[in-house]
Amino acid sequence: MSNQSSRYLTRSTASKYFSDIQIRAFHDPNARHHPGTHSGTILRTVAWNNLGSRIATGGAGGNVKIWNPEKADVRSSTDLKGTGLQVTERVQWDPTHAERLASCGVGDSGVVKFWDYRTAKATQDIKTGGDNYSLSYHPDAYVVAVGRKDNKIKLLDLRQNAVFQTIDEGNDQTFQTTFSHNGSLLLQTHVSGKVVLRSFPSLDIIHSFSAHTAGCYCLDISPSGKYVATGGNDALVSLWDTTDWVCVRTFDRSDHPFRSVSFSFDGAFLIAGSDESMPLDVMHVDTGDYIHEIKTGYPAHAVAWHPSKYVIAYTGEVLRVTGVGSFS
């Protein structure tokens, strides 16, 4: 990946920058196909490692694959086999190590596997006892929060290789769990539309707010910690100030629910993904303007910005990566 300009994009320069966008597709001819889904194979999750040197994807069939963003050739990718899952719902990289990651999903008693992609082998696994939907590393990488589909959140201790605490949310399904940058908070999104903030490690609820009129599916924290962006079933992306927890603005151009949302590395831009076939909009955080539209023609369920470049990875039937002048 070639070097991009070190200067930050402004509102006035961003439109031209993204209008010259390049898109590269990462095809896997060996992927399992699933009739009835769009284009057969659907990826559910995407994540960059902390250096931006590798991308992990997962989805139908329980597959987990590691891609080199420099090389779209499948021969340069790595398969992590033996997930034990029918569907991989979430992959996430260890925030302290560029070669380690975790995966979870549906199947095999809720196994969460921890991998070293250099050997393509699992280094440990912990079973939560049920199908899993979400996964989040604590910044110290010793604790992982896993949301099960039966509305329980399991806290895993990797040093003990065990579940050490359970949060039972009753009838209010939890869609995403995320630790704050300093690890002092655990944030949860709920089917009721609310966001719950728990102190960590006590897990006491210290605040909650109604972020959406329908299910709140996803959230992301800006790199500075100033904002939280949420996406919901009401087809809104909402921006929240983390000092007073008030809504600063909403992005309302879509007619479809959002399943993922991501801040750019500088916190200046947002992008959000959906289960519905719709374009991906690059949104400007400070003004609320829509900067650029990426046409997809298929559902792009998961989206993620590169950790230090204006480059976006997004999923659908295959992984795609965008970026101006990023690839030779």
Image (tube, rainbow, N blue to C red):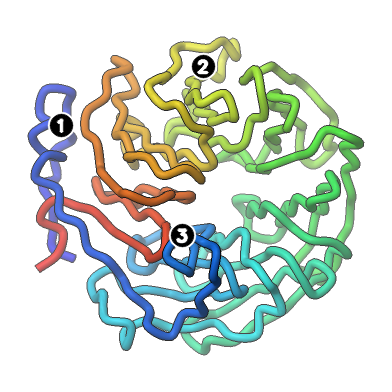
Q: Amino acid at mark 1?
A: Ala
Q: Which residue is mark 2?
A: 241
Query: Residue 26's quadrant in the figure?
Result: bottom left
Q: Which residue is mark 3?
A: 38
Q: Residue 95 at what x, y percent from top left?
A: 52, 58
Label for residue 14?
Answer: 1
Residue at x 65%, y 51% (from the top left corner): 138
Q: Residue 105 at what x, y percent from top left?
A: 69, 63
**Mark 3 touching mark 2, by CB under 8 A?**
no
Q: Residue 110 at what x, y percent from top left?
A: 80, 67
Can you say which quadrant of the picture contains the N terminus?
bottom left
Query: Residue 6's quadrant in the figure?
Result: top left
Task: Report how far apart the C-alphas of labels 2 and 1 lie in the structure.
Answer: 23 Å
In depth, the one of 193 and 124 nearer the eye is 193
**Mark 3 touching mark 1, by CB under 8 A?**
no
Task: Report how far apart the C-alphas of labels 3 and 2 lie in the structure.
Answer: 37 Å
**Mark toward the start of the polypeptide (2 vs 1):** 1
Residue at x 64%, y 30% (from the top left corner): 216
In depth, the one of 32 and 82 nearer the eye is 32
Residue at x 26%, y 74% (from the top left corner): 72
Residue 143 appears in view = yes
Task: Report how far apart the C-alphas of labels 3 and 1 lie in the structure.
Answer: 32 Å
How busy is the neighbourhood of tag 2: few (under 14 within 10 Å), some, or many (20 plus)? some
Q: Amino acid at mark 2?
A: Asp
How busy is the neighbourhood of tag 1: few (under 14 within 10 Å), some, or many (20 plus)? some
Query: Residue 81's quadrant in the figure?
Result: bottom right
Q: Nearer the viewer, mark 2 or mark 1?
A: 1
